[in-house]
Image (cartoon, grey):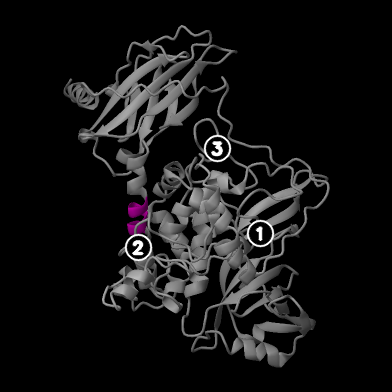
């Protein structure tokens, strides 16, 4: 009886009294069918799409000048993201596969991530086939003793473990989110474990080759960080299967790919990267750090299509800030918003990154939560899909970030094989701090109610993610409810049934009113209120399935 009484008191505290949401329903209707969770964008593409060549300097000028001017002059309205399903989530596709966002992902899964082969240092020696193309750092294309090819990259001299560690951490986290990434591992080897192929080539920045000699190899190895015991730490990134098509364009779609129908600047799984990359301080965002591959379907080799990847994460987690510029994540290369105040104050004004201290920990760069805010975070170069990102895209990313437990993060960081346990502890702690700073504002700008479902045929249940993840208190939260039929005519208001709650953030609505619509089409509007602040409304659309007449959630509209 005492437990029942406590539930009744909680129910009374959770139902808003005198707080009625504005009548904003009726703008959207959904087809009476379940939400789509898998998109068929794997239709056969008979002709290989044309490869897009990327020249770093020209691409940068294109983003800064040639695309920026017409983009700003167009003054087009900001549109909500597409490539989402009826419950405002991202379905599986050749761009994204739901992992931690929709199912329980064991922390141990992040220790391996997408990798299917053992690390390349278990199959030495490695045969050097050529140098890598592009970039100013040392790198080789190599093959292990079974013929598997890798891109081999190294830490900059004087900055051991930073770039290789950052790449693996971000690769594991983005894979857990759902993105396609290469199979990356930190490996250890010695100079004698690198054998020069008889036809090895050196390629310049434009990809023009010439024969590579042992002296060339020795000179390149002299530019990288080598341990006191002669061991070399490297990042081995396994070559992706299929034919290279280059990075995917920032704007529009890829020509020649009929499956690519949504302009990239309007894809949520692209726009939502802004909040994810801010969390990880993955500032090196550009077209040539994406990669499209023309592949054969594993289940049907006669079918070919394009799969979209994210690559090259070595400048994240404070790496570039420690090695090059302290303003990484605060300002773009050509951004004058910070330079002008500094100039007018004759250098007296202290910019936010100038007070950041580099941690004296082996392998850790300029990695901090101080002065960080997701809204003011900037990539080093303009990336136009991020200009289109809105609070709904940020909320989607925040939901993913909230699913990472400390154990998940620790496994991802341990995969980087740091030699100092203090580096693991420091990176995990800052990841947790930046996660909270990233999540909190989006859980206030968008109603963080999610996971709507019908239980026992008549109760609408949902999760309050802010309560579930510790960003709001249940005792300070109330919910205002209204119900409408298909024509937006108001029905008797349902009540919150706290006795049906099964978890800290779980709530249920019972009983639901019956709608006079032919298929029982029902709209339940929910407004969460924290103390005296009402969050934006959220409309849940329900209808009865044609086959069995059961009520089900068919759509979600966030205001």
Q: CA distance from mark 3 to mark 2?
A: 31 Å
Q: Mark 3 or 2, which is nearer the eye?
A: 3
Judge left or right: residue 105 versus residue 238. left
* Residue 4 figure quarter: top left
| Numbered circle sitting on residue 247 | 1
Secondary structure, mark 2, is helix
Q: Which residue is mark 3?
A: 84
| Point 75% across, 53% down: residue | 294
Q: CA distance from mark 2 to mark 1?
A: 31 Å
Q: Is residue 337 above or below residue 524?
A: below
Q: Which residue is mark 2?
A: 430
Whole-percent x, y for residue 20 in the image: 27, 22
The one nearer the camera, 134 or 194, is: 134
Instruction: Please report contact status of discs 2 and 1: CB closer than 8 Å, yes or no.
Output: no
Residue occupying the far bottom of the picture: 215
Q: Is residue 356 above or below residue 36?
A: below
Whole-percent x, y for residue 192 in the image: 65, 87
The one nearer the camera, 150 or 19, is: 19
Q: Which residues are magenta?
A: 432-438
Q: Earlier in the sequence, mark 3 or mark 2?
A: 3
Q: Quadrant of the N terminus?
A: top left
């Amino acid at each position: 009886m005492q437990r029942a009484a406590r539930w009744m008191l909680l129910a009374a505290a959770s139902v808003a009294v005198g707080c009625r949401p504005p009548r904003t329903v009726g703008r959207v209707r959904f087809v009476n069918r379940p939400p789509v969770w898998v998109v068929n964008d794997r239709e056969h593409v008979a002709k290989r799409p044309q490869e897009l060549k990327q020249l770093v300097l020209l691409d940068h000028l294109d983003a800064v000048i040639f695309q920026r001017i017409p983009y700003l002059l167009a003054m087009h309205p900001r549109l909500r993201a597409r490539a989402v399903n009826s419950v405002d989530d991202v379905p599986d596709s050749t761009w994204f596969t739901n992992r931690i966002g929709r199912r329980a992902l064991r922390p141990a899964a992040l220790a391996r991530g997408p990798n299917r082969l053992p690390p390349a240092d278990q199959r030495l020696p490695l045969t050097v086939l050529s140098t890598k193309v592009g970039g100013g750092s040392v790198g080789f294309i190599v093959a292990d003793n079974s013929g598997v090819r890798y891109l081999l990259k190294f830490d900059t001299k004087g900055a051991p473990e930073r770039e290789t560690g950052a790449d693996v951490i971000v690769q594991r986290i983005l894979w857990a989110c759902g993105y396609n990434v290469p199979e990356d591992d930190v490996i250890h080897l010695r100079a004698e474990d690198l054998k020069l192929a008889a036809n090895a080539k050196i390629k310049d920045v434009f990809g023009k080759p010439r024969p590579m000699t042992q002296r060339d190899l020795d000179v390149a190895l002299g530019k990288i960080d080598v341990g006191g015991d002669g061991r070399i730490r490297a990042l081995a990134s396994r070559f992706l299967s299929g034919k290279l098509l280059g990075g995917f364009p920032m704007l529009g779609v890829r020509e020649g790919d009929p499956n690519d129908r949504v302009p990239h600047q309007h894809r949520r799984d692209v726009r939502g990267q802004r909040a994810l990359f801010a969390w990880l301080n993955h500032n090196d965002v550009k077209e040539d750090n994406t990669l499209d591959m023309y592949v054969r379907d594993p289940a049907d080799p006669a079918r070919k299509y394009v799969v979209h990847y994210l690559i090259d994460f070595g400048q994240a987690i404070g790496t570039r800030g420690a090695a090059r510029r302290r303003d990484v994540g605060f300002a773009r290369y050509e951004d004058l918003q910070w330079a002008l105040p500094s100039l007018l104050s004759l250098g007296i004004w202290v910019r936010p990154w100038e007070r950041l201290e580099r941690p004296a920990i082996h392998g850790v760069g300029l990695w901090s939560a101080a002065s960080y805010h997701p809204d003011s975070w900037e990539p080093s170069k303009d990336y136009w899909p991020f200009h289109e990102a809105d609070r709904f895209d940020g909320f989607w990313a925040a939901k993913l970030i909230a699913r990472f437990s400390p154990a998940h993060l620790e496994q991802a960081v341990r995969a980087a094989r740091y030699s100092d346990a203090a580096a693991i502890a420091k990176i995990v702690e800052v990841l947790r701090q930046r996660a909270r700073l990233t999540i909190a504002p989006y859980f206030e700008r968008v109603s963080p109610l999610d996971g709507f479902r019908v239980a026992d045929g008549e109760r609408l249940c949902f999760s309050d993610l802010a309560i579930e993840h510790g960003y709001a208190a249940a005792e300070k939260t109330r919910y205002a409810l209204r119900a409408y039929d298909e024509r937006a005519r108001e029905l008797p208001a349902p009540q919150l049934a706290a006795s049906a709650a099964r978890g800290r953030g779980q709530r249920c609505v019972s009983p639901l009113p019956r709608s006079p619509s032919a298929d029982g089409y029902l709209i339940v509007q929910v407004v969460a209120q924290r103390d005296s602040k009402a969050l934006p409304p959220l409309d849940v659309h329900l209808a009865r399935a044609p086959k069995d007449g059961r009520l089900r959630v068919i759509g979600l509209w966030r205001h």
